[in-house]
Image (tube, helix red, strand yellow):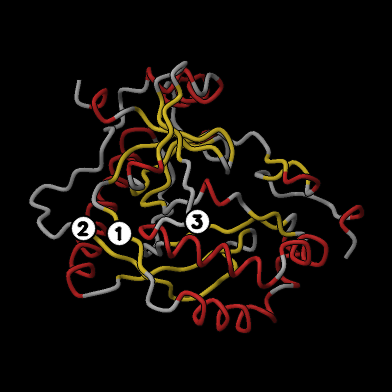
């Protein structure tokens, strides 16, 4: 499957050449990365996710997943399967998808118009967003932090290659169960308040590794998933990633995620 002949219908991908990401603005709740993975942009006062996993023991799982892609072969993934791998610096774990350019048309008015204007004005307009809590605080939550470990690789939605994650211990499993309940309440609120279509499914935490150009390309990789997963399990070993808080993030494409500074959230 030659890269030059590949038809791209994935709205998150502009071109395979030089890994160019399409403009795809939205908001989601993410696990907050470690403080040294947030880079402050003085012009906007936003903190951008910028995870340098190499030589950072706290990010050993991220580094291992990057090594898995290197082992499989990033050029091979692009040329054979039309997979555009995400930059390591953008690695993150989503807790709950919110509003984005793809689902904003579902919203009832006037919410639809307000959110379209908000997304069109990113990044600066993110300062104006007041209707979503900036943090994902769970009343009575006592079991932080949560630790996640590698489970398996999968092709998600016939569009993305992801590393599925799972709670690494009993305490993390308890936290995970509380997050699932609160996540469902958030989704129900959005459906009632804004008319957002309820797509709530069982929470499956994952680390996105890359996006396929189209569903045919994604299907062509399925036969190798087991082999890649076994290699990933060997390379990841017992590595875990630990999180202590959840915040609301905005994104302008699949490689650019940012949030309001913690001190500004509490102002």
Residue depicted at x 74% and y 65% = 77
Question: Residue 138, position in %: x, y?
Answer: 17, 48
User: Of residues 110 and 247, which is closer to you in this image?
Assistant: 247
Q: Residue at (46%, 24%) from the top-left corner?
A: 41
The local crowd at label 2, few if under 14, some if 14 to 19, many if 20 or more residues have their Cα within 10 Å, is few
Residue 152 — which label? none
**Percent x, y of residue 208:** 53, 57
Residue 210 versus residue 260 in the image, above or below: below
Q: Residue at x 26, y 31 (%)?
A: 262
Q: What is the secondary structure assignment of the residue under circle 1?
A: strand
Residue 54, numbered label = 3
Distance in Å between CA atoms under marks 1 and 3:
16 Å
Residue located beneath label 1 in the image: 242
Of callouts 2 and 1, which one flags the residue occurring earlier in the amino acid sequence?
2
Q: Quadrant of the C terminus?
A: top left
Please state which of residues 176 and 187 is positioned toward the viewer in this rendering: 176
Report the Cα–Cα distance between label 2 and label 1: 7 Å
Q: Position of residue 126 (x, y in %)?
A: 42, 23
234 sits to left or right of 15: left
- Labels 3, 2: front one: 3
Hey, which quadrant is residue 110 in on the image? top left
| 4 with respect to 238 (left or right) | right
Q: Residues within 10 Å of mark 3 (few under 14, many from 20)?
A: some
Name the residue tied to disc 2: 145
Which circle's residue, 1 or 3, is located before the other in the chain?
A: 3
Chain-order first, disc 3 or disc 2: 3
């Amino acid at each position: 499957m030659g890269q030059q002949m590949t038809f791209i219908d994935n709205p998150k991908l502009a071109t395979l050449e030089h890994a160019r990401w399409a403009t795809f603005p939205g908001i989601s709740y993410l696990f907050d990365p470690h403080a040294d993975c947030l880079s402050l942009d003085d012009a906007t006062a936003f903190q951008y996710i910028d995870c340098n996993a190499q030589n950072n023991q706290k990010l050993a799982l991220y580094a291992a997943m990057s090594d898995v892609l290197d082992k499989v072969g990033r050029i091979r993934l692009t040329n054979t399967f039309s997979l555009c791998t995400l930059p390591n610096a953008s690695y993150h774990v989503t807790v709950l998808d919110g509003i984005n350019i793809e689902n904003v048309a579902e919203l009832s008015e006037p919410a639809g118009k307000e959110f379209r204007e908000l997304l069109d004005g990113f990044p600066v307009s993110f300062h104006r967003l007041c209707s979503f809590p900036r943090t994902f605080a769970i009343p009575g939550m006592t079991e932080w932090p949560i630790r996640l470990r590698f489970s398996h690789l999968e092709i998600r939605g016939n569009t993305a290659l992801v590393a599925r994650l799972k709670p690494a211990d009993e305490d993390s499993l308890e936290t995970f169960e509380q997050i699932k309940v609160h996540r469902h309440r958030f989704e129900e609120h959005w459906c009632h308040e804004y008319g957002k279509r309820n797509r709530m499914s069982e929470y499956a935490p994952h680390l996105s590794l890359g996006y396929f150009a189209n569903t045919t390309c994604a299907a062509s990789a399925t036969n190798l998933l087991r082999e890649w997963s076994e290699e990933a399990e060997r390379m990841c070993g017992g590595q875990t990633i630990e999180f202590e808080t959840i915040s609301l993030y905005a994104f302008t494409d699949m490689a650019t995620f940012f949030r309001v500074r913690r001190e500004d959230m509490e102002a």
